[in-house]
Image (spheres, grey):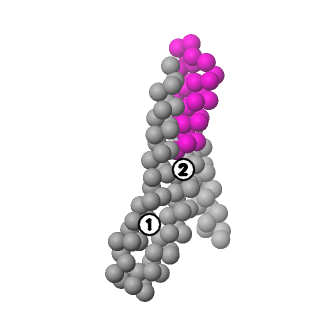
Amino acid sequence: MKKIVSVLLFIAVLALVVGLGFAQEAEHAAAAARSLGDGLLGIGAGLAIGLAAIGVGIAQGYIGSAGLGLLAERPGAFGQVLIYLVIPETLIIFGFVIAFFLNNQIG
């Protein structure tokens, strides 16, 4: 349990650093006479990627453990397990798309 909490804390700190990185990008843009809204868009883009990554990581952990249990019982179900592992990856792709759209609105 302590390991899970430490991993989630690490992921949360990593998401915060990514958000601050986008905010610093917006800070440099503020020097070029941009508004506070641009900084908030940068933080939103960072949060879109970070929170999507956290959700995908948690989902794939549960799916992976269940998939390994299924493969131990039925080795022929590898394709089915692989599809189940790929489905949550679409969430992170949506997070990247949202971050891309938000960054294009800056400036």
Q: Which residue is mark 2?
A: 52
Residue drawn at x 51%, y 25% is: 105
Tell me the chief SS of the magenta region: helix
Residue drawn at x 48%, y 45% is: 94
Mark toward the viewer: 1 or 2: 1
Residue 9 position (above or below residue 25): below
Along the line of sight, the residue nearer the viewer: 10 or 103: 103
Residue 17 visible: no
Q: Which residue is mark 1?
A: 84
Q: Which SS class for mark 1?
A: helix
Determine the residue located farthest toward the bottom in the rendered image: 73
Residue 89 visible: yes
Three-letter residue code for mark 2: Ala
Three-letter residue code for mark 1: Tyr
Mark 1 or mark 2: name the one nearer the start of the chain: 2
Task: Specify the segment rendered in magenta.
Answer: 21-49
Counting from the top left corner in percent of width and height, residue 59 is at 54, 63
Q: Are marks 1 and 2 in contact (CB under 8 Å)?
A: no
Determine the residue located farthest toward the top in the rendered image: 33
Residue drawn at x 54%, y 50% is: 52
Q: CA distance from mark 1 to mark 2?
A: 17 Å
* Crowdedness near tag 2: few (<14), some (14–19) or many (≥20) residues, C-alpha within 10 Å: many
Residue drawn at x 62%, y 29% is: 40
Q: Which SS class for mark 2?
A: helix
Whether 42 is among the magenta residues is: yes
Counting from the top left corner in percent of width and height, residue 46 is at 55, 39
> Considering the image in quadrants, where does the N terminus appear?
bottom right
Counting from the top left corner in percent of width and height, residue 106 is at 52, 24
